Amino acid sequence: MQGKNSSKAWVSEGLEVGYTTKPVSGWGGLVVVYRFFEQLHLREWLREVLPDGRTSPNQIPVVDIVWSLFATVLTGGRRFAHVERLRGDEVVSGVLGVRRIPSAMTLTRYFRGFVRRQVEELSEGLWRLCWPHLASSPLGEVLDLDSTVFERYGHQEGSRKGHNPRKPGRPCHRPLLAMLATSKLILHGWLRSGNTGSSEGSEAFLTEALARLPEDYRLYGVRADNGFFTTGVLNALEDNELPYVIAVKMNRRIRRRIAGIDNWRALEPGLEVGEGTYQAHGWSVPRRLVVVRHELRERPQASGRKLFDLPGFSFHAYVTSLPHPPQEVWRFYNARGDCENRFKELKHDFGADGFCLQTFDGTESVFRLICFLFNLLELFRQQVLAATSERLVTLRHKYLVVGGILGARGRRTVLRLGLRGPWKRRFQVLLARLRGLRCPTVAQLTQLCHTAPLPPPSPWRPRPPRGPHRPLNRFWLPFN
């Protein structure tokens, strides 16, 4: 007698396995994203900003190299080697409009040839494409500044032991990001050596980020973590008349000042807020200090610093130029937590911490391209998906993983998607929205930016990988 479940246990044995020579793929949904890219005239723009100087008669165009890098990220790739799984996919090649997808070695050889000047030229050119899509608000945009850690496994340039809270002692890079809270776009990004101090280069980074904004663009305020708590950053913000809220580093003098605050006001059980002034060494004037404290007996899971003079509490302190009540300043700073979600999406969904080369400038060029792809996907969310807040990992399974067969109708190539019912209607709505988009051309975009046309990029040339016997140059430290 057979077991209770034996009749269904081997039902697949009756399913015959066959093969087809038709081009079939599980990534047919990529077509909606790449049609959006074409609506932005992205391919033409990339031709203007990508450096090239290769002489091989069998070379793959640099636009196709970046096009394929984007497809690798969108399909879940986290290493250059992951592009290999797309090379034999004729459907993906057809969606991308490329004759052939480059190998992982072609990608690494190209990006390894980047130098600092080319990284900056590329980053500036890519950001200009985002100018017409910046959100406007009556109050102005909010700029968030933050840093994170990319763990590294190897001996790449800039991969050094430093502050690494998740894996202490592990070599890493420490990127900086400037993000616009309303537009949800990444304004600027730096890759830094792992042994860089948290405040090193913060003033120069802020200056570069502000220079990227149009002259008539209004900022309501700036929020930053304690890595930007420096005299230079505070002076730069005040010189530009930008209100700010910046977390402070709890040194001995600030702890004593917090211990002297006596105007605590209860907001919730176990949560109080107070304020005062603080003048650090080198400051010409005192600045406003807002402090929030949590009673650990009521809130045992609360984060923050503990003070020896005030046991039983944890503290957060901020220096600010905002005139609002202290509780409103604290709530305004807490809204900065959304930028942490951008870091998580960059690392977990876009694989920004996985594409690493031996050369520092090569790694940074790919990092900035992935930040640009993040911006493109955010524009796709806003203009095509009706401002959804879903992350890439959700969009990938919801829209991109679609079975597709590449065929023909007469002389035209046709992509047939395996969708029906509500899924088919949903995809048809997205394609209809794409047809209705009106994006500026390359010439119109240059006029909108009120700037001169982009200069031609510096010529690219091959550069051999740096051997362990060769000394490292210091140019990859951006704050030098």
Image (cartoon, rainbow, N blue to C red):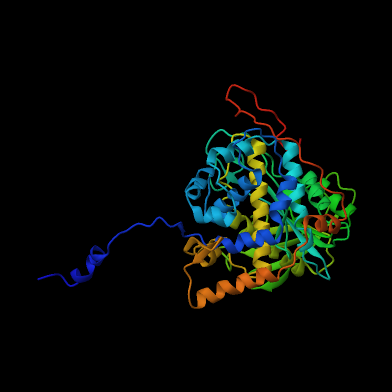
- Is 308 left or right of 131, judged from the image as shown? left
Q: Position of residue 334 (x, y in %)?
A: 69, 64
Please identify the quarter of the rendering in which residue 282 is found: top right
Q: Which residue is located at x 61 percent, y 43 percent?
A: 163
Residue furthest to the front: 410
Please identify the quarter of the rendering in which residue 1 is found: bottom left
Judge whether 247 appears above or below 84 on screen.
below
Q: Which residue is located at x 48 percent, y 71 percent?
A: 419
Q: Position of residue 474 (x, y in %)?
A: 71, 30
- Is 64 left or right of 79, judged from the image as shown? right
Residue furthest to the left: 1
Which image quadrant: the C terminus? Answer: top right
Q: Which residue is located at x 73 percent, y 51 percent?
A: 45
Judge whether 25 appears above or below 432 on screen.
above
Name the one closer to the observer, 104 or 194: 104
Judge whether 451 appears above or below 324 on screen.
above
- Is 82 left or right of 5, judged from the image as shown? right
